[in-house]
Amino acid sequence: MKNILIIGGGAMGSAFTIPCLENNNKVTITEPYNKSFIKNLSSKKKYHSSLKLQLPRKLKFKNFSKNILNEKFDLIVIALSLPGIDFIGRELKDLRIKTPILILTKGLKYDKKNNKIVTIPELLNKKYNVINVSTLKGPCLAKELANKKQTNVVIANKKIKIAKWIGKQISTKYYLTEFSKDIIGIEICSAIKNIYSMIIGAGQSLNTSSGLFQKSVVEMKYLIKYFKGDEKTIYGLAGTGDLYVSAAGGRNSKMGSYLGKGYTFKTAKKKFMYRDTVEGEQLAKEIAPFIFKKINKKRIPLMLNLLRAIIKNKRLKLT
Ligand SMILES: NC(=O)c1ccc[n+]([C@@H]2O[C@H](COP(=O)([O-])OP(=O)(O)OC[C@H]3O[C@@H](n4cnc5c(N)ncnc54)[C@H](O)[C@@H]3O)[C@@H](O)[C@H]2O)c1
């Protein structure tokens, strides 16, 4: 039995508690930001409003404070969305916690000072001195995991032993883990699939979307190589695996479908998805300054068209 702390009580952090508990771990969840999740998790029934189910009674909730990070855990899991990464980085800064840290968050950051795109593990390490960071990615809808549907994910760390140790603590019959050393490739894939799933969603027929799927894979492969990941990672769970699930359903492909119908991004957001967080939008805004300036325009025409649609509010072109 290990002692696991999960930071982030949204859909994913909460769903992740289920295999961890089933694997006989002691699991504590904390939520630093969202009042409604705090209310859900601290209530007696533990009914989660996004997952629409009751979380196990064994799950322990603690209010977030810096002190909690100094308590003794065997594994710390970060399940905040991208805007929460700098927050948790600041909280962890210089604590020199040796405990393995596992990142579920998908996304990339733009380091303005050095004009560079950085992965989340790299940002935590270089900017906030966080050590021993692994990442877990793959096709996983939180609601399906919470309902124990078979889910396959990949855990990455250059030290594969650490990735395998984490896998042993969290895998169950329905939560299956693979391992990889390619942290960069996995982080790039799992982030940019939010943009490519919008592009695929923009196709207004299966024929069009399938063609866009194939072209997206080619661009993703190019980008993985550009950022010095292993291009084979595109064929893994964090690549085509995650691209499939995001293109088949979810908020990014829904936004893509409006863009494909000819709405501009601003109109579509206001008219149909006012309250929804579209992760591809957050990522597009983060990486656009770098992509526009630095990357060979001929190699990633779909990505550029999508970035223009979001940043410049232009109608999306798919050719
Ligand atoms: N690795 C995986 O298998 C996997 C699967 C699904 C989702 N995800 C990723 O997990 C992350 C969370 O997804 P979710 O579905 O739980 O989202 P959610 O909206 O349900 O929860 C978001 C979480 O981030 C926190 N947060 C948001 N903005 C914040 C801020 N400014 N400061 C601090 N905390 C903030 C919220 O309080 C909440 O805990 C996303 O990056 C998503 O892509 C990972």
Image (spheres, rainbow, N blue to C red):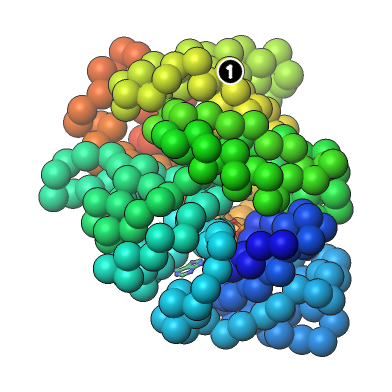
Most extreme residue toward the left is: 113
- Taking the image as shown, residue 287 lies to the left or right of residue 33, namely left
Q: Nearer the viewer, residue 131 or 13?
A: 131
Q: Quadrant of ligand 1?
A: bottom right
**Residue at coordinates 36% horizontally, 35% vertically from top-left?**
308
State the image quarter where residue 77 is shown: bottom right
State the image quarter where residue 128 is shown: bottom left
- Vertical order, 200 against 41 (above or below): above
Quarter of the picture containing the N terminus is bottom right
Can residue 135 be seen by looking at this rendering?
yes
The percent coordinates of residue 142 (x first, y second) are: 72, 52
Count of picture labels: 1
- Vertical order, 42 against 198 (above or below): below
- Taking the image as shown, residue 66 lies to the left or right of residue 256, namely left
- Identify residue for label 1: 235
User: Which amino acid, by three-letter code, is at mark 1?
Assistant: Tyr
The percent coordinates of residue 264 (x first, y second) are: 49, 42
Can residue 36 be seen by looking at this rendering?
no
- Vertical order, 141 against 238 (above or below): below
**Residue at coordinates 85% horizontally, 82% vertically from top-left?**
45
- Vertical order, 71 against 173 (above or below): below
Q: Nearer the viewer, residue 187 or 245?
A: 187
**Residue at coordinates 28% horizontally, 40% vertically from top-left?**
117
State the image quarter where residue 61 is shown: bottom right
The percent coordinates of residue 91 (x first, y second) are: 36, 73
